[in-house]
Image: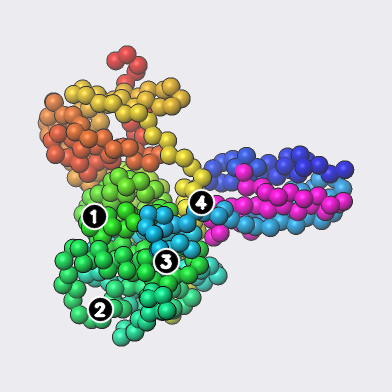
């Protein structure tokens, strides 16, 4: 007699690489049915585009077939039904979109729009229902990226904008409405246009909608984060000082409005020589490690300088770098859906910062020691890794003005010397922590 407990014990041998827990403990196993020598069940993943779902399916079949008396196994791969994305505004056309992902850079010229378009197109190529909304009113990129100039946008019977469909994607951009003319528009009008593009486009049923965010951290960003329930944000950067400073601003912006950061994509990280095959990091080696040390956030991908990334994405071409980046983004999205934000209680005064965790542990770090440990682009040379910030540069009375918890990975601090671009990963703070009682 086959029992449910035997099936669960067999499936406990399958470990999710992101959480380092078995799929039974994670609650992925649903609807077990046993009929004589046949077993069927669902594996409910956190996102439909999970890149290892076929691996899970194969391992699950093998594990259950290893149980005595089991002759037939049926594994159905499903995904969690996420709540409707548009929960902050009534009568939004985003109600049938399951996951909305912002792709941001906070600085122009880093290839954000190209990365957003490539990842969206890769998911569409895999058979998912995907949309791409171009939220950059002043510099829309989607029309050029997809060779869609002089297109006409129509309305449907519900007075909704009908998205342009290309390469299996649903696209909407202010550039479709504007044409080649400049967008000379004041802030309140821009907000109205963004509302129209996001909430009045007939998106229909979508698995994923990517929002190509404009540079900066202004009105458009606030409008989007206040009216759209974003599933997460991917930040695209290049390993240059100005870009890295803006990365910190972007992280702080999204965290202040409770949007989880899925990770960073380091674009134009290197070029690969055709002759020798060597990677040349023109902005310094080990940039991914540097980004992780500075921000405490995972670098999802390093994208090289390639001719393909300077051209329109039409016609679509599968690319190993984009395929890998897409897998990483989807894994990060799934991880974010199941992880709970763990934020310590934070206290600070003129001498120290104290982090008190729910498990009872407490970290205390000296203000000046923490300020001197800053690894932002103003304090560390990103090319050499050499420390720019010197001890005499930091006043003895340095103290926080504001401390912002950043997800499960760091805190952001605005210091009384005006410095505010530093992000301090918890792992670094733990190393600096003073013994209890000091």
**Is disc 1 surrounded by few (<14), some (14 to 19) or many (20+) residues within 10 Å?**
some
Which mark is first along the chain, 3 or 2? 3
Q: CA distance from mark 3 to mark 4?
A: 24 Å
Which mark is first along the chain, 3 or 1? 3
**Viewer-closest of 238 and 350:** 350
Which mark is first along the chain, 1 or 2? 2
SS for callout 1 = loop
**Is disc 3 surrounded by few (<14), some (14 to 19) or many (20+) residues within 10 Å?**
many
Residue 334: assigned label: 4
Which mark is first along the chain, 4 or 3? 3
Q: Nearer the viewer, mark 2 or mark 3?
A: 3
Q: Are the residues at dot 3 and dot 4 in contact (C-beta closer than 8 Å)?
A: no
**What's the residue at 24%, 41% (across, down)?**
422
Q: Could you say which quadrant of the image residue 157 lies in?
A: bottom left
**350 to 383, vertically: above or below:** above
**Viewer-closest of 62 and 375:** 62
Which mark is first along the chain, 1 or 4? 1
The residue wearing badge 3 is 93
């Amino acid at each position: 007699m086959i029992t449910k407990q035997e099936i669960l014990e067999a499936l406990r041998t399958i470990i999710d690489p992101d959480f380092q827990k078995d799929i039974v403990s994670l609650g992925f196993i649903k609807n077990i049915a046993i009929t004589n020598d046949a077993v069927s069940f669902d594996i409910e993943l956190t996102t439909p585009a999970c890149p290892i779902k076929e691996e899970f399916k194969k391992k699950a079949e093998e594990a259950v077939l290893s149980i005595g008396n089991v002759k037939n196994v049926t594994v159905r791969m499903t995904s969690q039904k996420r709540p409707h994305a548009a929960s902050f505004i009534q009568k939004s056309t985003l109600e049938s979109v399951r996951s909305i992902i912002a792709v941001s850079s906070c600085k122009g010229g880093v290839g954000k729009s190209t990365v957003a378009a490539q990842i969206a197109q890769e998911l569409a190529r895999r058979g998912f229902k995907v949309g791409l909304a171009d939220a950059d009113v002043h510099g829309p990129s989607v029309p050029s990226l997809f060779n869609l100039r002089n297109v006409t946008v129509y309305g449907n019977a519900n007075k909704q904008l009908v998205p342009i469909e290309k390469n299996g994607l649903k696209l909407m951009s202010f550039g479709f409405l504007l044409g080649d003319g400049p967008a000379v528009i004041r802030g309140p009008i821009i907000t109205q246009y963004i509302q129209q593009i996001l909430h009045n486009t007939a998106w229909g049923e979508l698995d994923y909608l990517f929002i190509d965010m404009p540079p900066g951290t202004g009105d458009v960003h606030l409008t989007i984060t206040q009216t759209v329930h974003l599933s997460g944000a991917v930040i695209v950067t290049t390993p240059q000082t100005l870009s890295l400073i803006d990365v910190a601003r972007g992280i702080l912006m999204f965290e202040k409005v409770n949007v989880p950061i899925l990770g960073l994509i380091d674009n134009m990280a290197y070029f690969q020589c055709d002759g020798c095959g060597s990677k040349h990091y023109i902005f310094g080696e080990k940039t991914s490690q540097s980004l992780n040390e500075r921000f405490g956030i995972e670098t999802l991908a390093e994208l090289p300088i390639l001719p393909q990334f300077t051209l329109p994405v039409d016609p679509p071409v599968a690319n190993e770098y984009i395929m890998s980046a897409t897998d990483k983004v989807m894994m990060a999205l799934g991880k974010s859906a199941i992880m709970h934000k763990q934020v310590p209680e934070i206290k600070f005064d003129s001498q120290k910062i104290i982090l008190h965790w729910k498990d009872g542990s407490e970290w205390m770090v000296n203000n000046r020691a923490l300020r001197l440990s800053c690894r932002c682009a103003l304090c560390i040379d990103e090319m050499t890794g050499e420390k720019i910030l010197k001890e005499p540069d930091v006043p003895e009375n340095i103290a926080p003005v504001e401390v912002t918890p950043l997800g499960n990975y760091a805190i952001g601090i605005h210091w009384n010397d005006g410095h505010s671009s530093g992000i301090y990963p918890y792992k670094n703070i733990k190393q600096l922590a003073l013994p209890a009682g000091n």
